[in-house]
Amino acid sequence: MPVPPRALTKSHFETLSEFRYQMRCFERFSERAAQGEGITPQQYLLLLHVKGFPGRAWASVGELAERLQMQAHGAVALVSRCEALELVERRASTTDRRQVEVHLLAKGEQLLQRLASLHRAELKSLGGAFQVPQIDLAVTA
């Protein structure tokens, strides 16, 4: 018969709370940094995910929707807003005409470089305070 999991202790909740607090502080920093550059936090994340997509210099709208954890139609609208700001452009895929590739433009690249540098400095300033919590729930028989 399986052993039921142990209940979380007060210490576990404190660890989770601290992690969420640190995560929210970083998110708030990110929001303010993006707004300081005249874009929304979502627009910054879109630029980041285009540039940071593994193995290539572009991402599809569907891949961006997944990375942003949003519906495809929301990602389409976000790409359109970034396109209007001349941060990205859509291109038809050369291998699959049904697929649309989202590429950074020079203005988007420059903006992303500035914001990513700020984010990197902020993460370094946290000095390891932002860590994934260890809440092992090993059950002793």
Image (cartoon, rainbow, N blue to C red):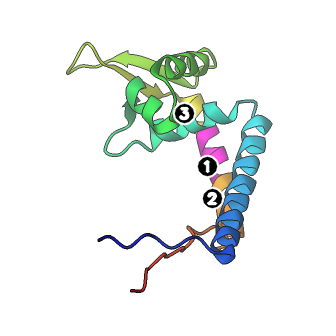
Q: Nearer the viewer, residue 26 or 50?
A: 26
Which region is colored magenta? 111-117
Q: Nearer the viewer, mark 3 or mark 2?
A: 3
Whether pointer 2 and pointer 1 mark residues with C-beta atoms closer than 8 Å, the reply is yes
Q: Bin the neighbour count of mark 3 within 10 Å (Cα to Cα): few under 14, some 14-19, many 20 and up.
A: many
Question: Magenta segment, principal secondary structure?
Answer: helix
Disc 3 to disc 2: CB gap under 8 Å: no
Q: Amino acid at mark 3?
A: Leu
Residue identified by numbered label 1: 116
Q: Which residue is mark 2?
A: 120
Circle nearer the N terminus (1, 3): 3
Residue 94: image location, x then y, percent: 24, 19
Q: Residue at x 73, y 60 (%)?
A: 21
Assess whether mark 3 and mark 1 are in contact (beta carbons under 8 angstroms): no
Q: Quadrant of residue 90?
A: top left
- Tally the marks: 3
**Kind of residue indicated by mark 2:** Arg
- Residue placed farthest to the bottom in the image? 141
